[in-house]
Image (cartoon, rainbow, N blue to C red):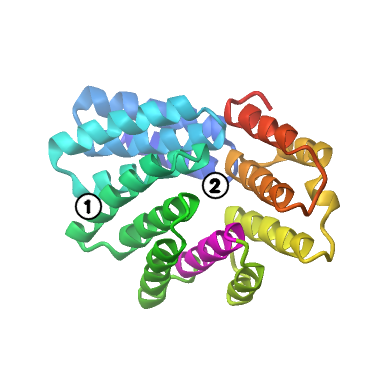
Amino acid sequence: LLADAWNNMGLVRWQLGRLADAAASFEQALAIWRKIGNPFSEIAAQSNLSIIAEKQGRLEEAKRRCEQALARAEELGYLHGISAILANLSNLELLRREWPAAELHGSRSLYAARLTGHANSEAIALENLGLAQGGAGFYEEAIRSLRLAEQLGDQSGDPLRRDSARLAQAWVAFAKGRQSVASHLMERIGTDLSPDLQAWRETLQLACRASDGLNGFDDFEPEKIESWQRGVSLEDGLRRLDAAILLCERGVFQHQVELLRKLREDRLAGIA
């Protein structure tokens, strides 16, 4: 009961945005579950700690915790846990732009999810897989994976999962230089989004408008991005930098693309 109380406190603190306090609560729960021998709850605590470490920019710790949780889940044959942990690992590699590793973890996560028949886990795996395929330049394969994720969200009555997949499709289309497709997809996304998805859509909307020569140019100035980075999550910050880099490479801006790449490397390393 004490471990459950610590875990519930961690979840509440997480919802309130108090990530350091949430991590401290999960650590307390993890220690108790290890002591009494509750491996399934131990896996859940490690996974939560991994996600918090990622959001705070500590990617090496996030990966280590994921790998520890995965090893434990594989020992137990715990497919639900395996699918979720592999999805987290895939997301970590997406942040690093390590497309082959992200695709491998995404494919394995998808396989485990389909064995369990869990539609939400399957949709998450497909979304990670599609983003990895898009990053690697396989546009058609990426859109196919992401449309399957969108359909699963729709069929299961989960608008957030559906809209997340649509937003991922829009991102892949924008990265491919298909702004009109990206804009059309964003028009089909609802307004009730999580803060992370809302920040992603805002970045993509600004990028599409800038690419079309409308407005939004100021938002991609290196100095403004560097300042803006301090108040957002690692994932949000990297997406804004990635959009700026793509716009520079297309000649939309005259910024120094190497400066933006350096900002990205620093943020990934926890320097910025």
* Disc 1 element: helix
Q: Residues within 10 Å of mark 2 (few under 14, many from 20)?
A: few
Q: Is residue 254 shown above or below 179? A: above
Distance, label 1 to label 2, CA atoms, is 28 Å
Q: Is residue 164 magenta?
A: yes
Q: Which residues are magenta?
A: 161-176
Which of the two marks, 1 or 2, is nearer to us in this view? 1
Residue 75 in percent (x, y) is at 14, 34
Give the overall secondary structure of the magenta segment.
helix
Nearer to me, 214 or 194: 214
Q: Amino acid at mark 1?
A: Ala
Residue 226 in percent (x, y) is at 76, 35
Q: Amino acid at mark 2?
A: Gln
**In this picture, residue 272 sits left or right of residue 29:** right
**In this picture, residue 84 sits left or right of residue 10:** left
Q: Is residue 5 magenta?
A: no
* Disc 2 element: helix
Residue 225 in percent (x, y) is at 77, 41
- Residue placed under numbered mark 2 in the picture: 15
Q: Residue at x 50, y 40 (%)?
A: 97
Q: The C terminus appears in which quarter of the rendering?
A: top right
Residue 124 in percent (x, y) is at 38, 57
Q: Quadrant of residue 45?
A: top left
- Residue placed under numbered mark 1 in the picture: 112
Q: Quadrant of residue 43?
A: top left
Q: Quadrant of residue 213?
A: bottom right
